Image: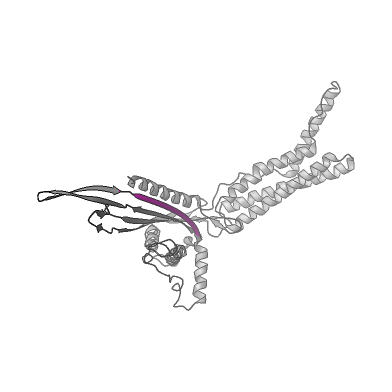
Amino acid sequence: MFGILRGDGLAQVNVDQVVKLIKCEMAQAILAKTNEQSEDKKSYPFTFLLQWAVKLHLTVVVDDQASINPGATLISPLPAVGSVSQQRSVGLGVGFTSQAVRTEDYEYLMSFAELGDEFRKTRKNMPRIAKLYKFCRLDRGLLLESELGLKALVDAALEPVRTEVLRAGPGAIGPGAAPTPQGKLPEPIGQLATIRAKREKIDKLFTEKALTDKTLTPPAGNVATDIETQTQAIINNVVKPLYGIASTSSFEPKCLATITTAQNQAIISSIGVSTNVAKYNLEDDPILKKRILDKVENDFKDTVYSANDMITDYGDCATGRGKQDHNTYDPIALIGQTVNFYVTSTGSVTPTWKLINVTAPLAPAFLSATRKDTNTLIISMGRPIVAADGSITESQAMNNQILAAQLAQAIAQQRSTP
């Protein structure tokens, strides 16, 4: 199947050669599948794979054991009794055993779309007959000869899609879809009128009570700080949580970018509110205070407008508008495979010396060594999460599949350990 360990052990294969083999097989299996037509030749049912990615988790465990068992039998002849010879023997021996276990883990993430672009360039820049041949020509070692069977795996997993037992489903529920907020924030002019009215009511009530009770403390805050409080409530309770949900959904990069822009505009406007409120509280001139308060209100309006734009953009992304092809969801969620490969090498040296007074060694093996290479490859294919900058990361489902495979490996190893 394959071997790991750079220039070491029986495999004599570099890690990059193993990854190259996987990448080559993946390209041949997936890209060929996306070019397949349906039975009626009217559609290409597997093009959704171009929006998928594969995560590879490679574990290499090397277990080296060595032992040396020097020993000898000391023989002392004794006087013969008649025709029977006699001797006395004493066995001396010592044993030494050492074991070293090394575990290495590697993880790789490959986008099928980027893989397709890479091989399209390869086909363009090379003679037609070369195609994938040059890339897939490996420095094959003793254990880098067989295929991983990825084409058979993909064909078997997608057979229900080919026969239309499973179909891509319509609607907004699926990759990239998410629940949408119910409604938007009230118009900022109405909110400002409500804030002013509440503050006037508070101030009026204090003035009336202060006529009879001179010990009353003036109410905290003012209309500017009330606007700031409302602004921060919008940022903390609407803008930031909504962006948190959007950033963990599989929205198209351009779609998520519009949400990011609206969020940034809302936050910048809210900073303007807080900055001018600080100036307002330090100013004594009534005319200047009025001008600063106007800026506070304008920044508040911009915050509300940007937050509502964000809600609109989020709704468009969540329901599939503005997306490349998310009016349907994938007919299959995940394809995974775990491959184990074991290499065990042993060796021993047992010289024998039989002298008159000494016979050595005592142990069956004077010097022995054992090496066991355990290579585990876990493959998880599925739709990744796409960030606003176009970068991708594996989905939670892909991570869960790898974790489940690792857990199964650990349980199996525990059971096999005496």
- The magenta stretch is 93-109
Residue 161, position as x, y percentages in the image: 40, 58
Observer able to see residue 183: no
Q: Residue at x 79, y 37 (%)?
A: 223
- Side of 160 relative to 182 (left or right): left
Q: Choose top left, top right, bottom left or bottom right for residue 277.
A: top right
Residue in front for this viewpoint, 119 or 304: 119
For residue 101: magenta?
Answer: yes
Residue 262, position as x, y percentages in the image: 67, 52
Observer able to see residue 118: yes
- Side of 37 relative to 327 (left or right): left
Q: Residue furthest front?
A: 79
Q: Quadrant of the C terminus?
A: top left
Residue 41, position as x, y percentages in the image: 42, 67
Q: Residue furthest left?
A: 82
Residue 307, position as x, y percentages in the image: 68, 48
Q: Residue furthest top?
A: 212
**Most frequent secondary structure within the magenta stretch:** strand
- Side of 328 relative to 76 (left or right): right
- Side of 32 relative to 214 (left or right): left
Q: Residue at x 88, y 43 (%)?
A: 288
Q: How is the image coloured?
A: one colour
Residue in front for this viewpoint, 242 or 43: 242
- Residue 160 versus residue 95 in the image, above or below: below
Q: Quadrant of the N terminus?
A: bottom left
Q: Choose top left, top right, bottom left or bottom right for residue 45.
A: bottom left
For residue 273: magenta?
Answer: no
- Residue 77 versus residue 13 in the image, above or below: above
